[in-house]
Amino acid sequence: MKQKLFSLVAGLGVILASVINPMENPVRAQGNEVIVEGNITQNTTWTPDKEYVLNGAVFVKELATLTILPGTTIKGLDRSLLVIDRGAKIMAEGTPTAPIVFTSAQEPGSRTPRDWGGVWINGRDPYAIC
């Protein structure tokens, strides 16, 4: 029962986020930070020389691939999440010396669980909500 309720709530969250934030490929740079919002609709690579900040729901859309290179840091602002849609791909393989880090955008010492929504991968299985 809890699993079904979680799946329902998670699905509704994805739908609501897509309605609230329907932009296509909006990326803004602020110094070394890259603010990412909306939809990623073309193949995109995130590199370790930048810090990526998710603002709201960010969707990797069908047929697009998001590649994240080793050593890259991704931070999530409040109420942000990264969603890999069905038919999209995420390629992210860190190394022991250059891990890929997903974390809160809050300052160290102020971070708490649930600061941001995490990474959701939606597959073709009807129960594939991660």
Image (cartoon, grey):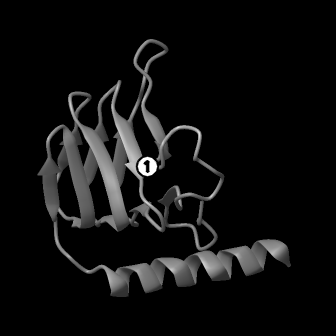
Return the residue nearer the eye: 88 or 25.
25
Q: Residue at x 28, y 66 (%)?
A: 61
Q: Amino acid at mark 1?
A: Ala
Q: Is residue 88 visible?
A: no
Label 1 packing within 10 angstroms: few (<14), some (14-19), many (20+)? many
Q: Is residue 30 above or below residue 38?
A: above
Quarter of the image with the C terminus is: bottom right
Tell me the quarter of the picture where residue 114 sits.
bottom right
Quarter assignment of residue 72:
top left
Name the residue tied to disc 1.
Answer: 105
Q: Is residue 51 above or below residue 41?
A: above
The residue nearer to you, when weighing 62 against 109, is 109
Q: Secondary structure at mark 1?
A: loop
In the displayed structure, would residue 95 be above or below residue 42? above
Task: Kindly tell me whether residue 21 is visible in this rendering.
Answer: yes
Look at 83% across and 74% down and name the residue there: 2
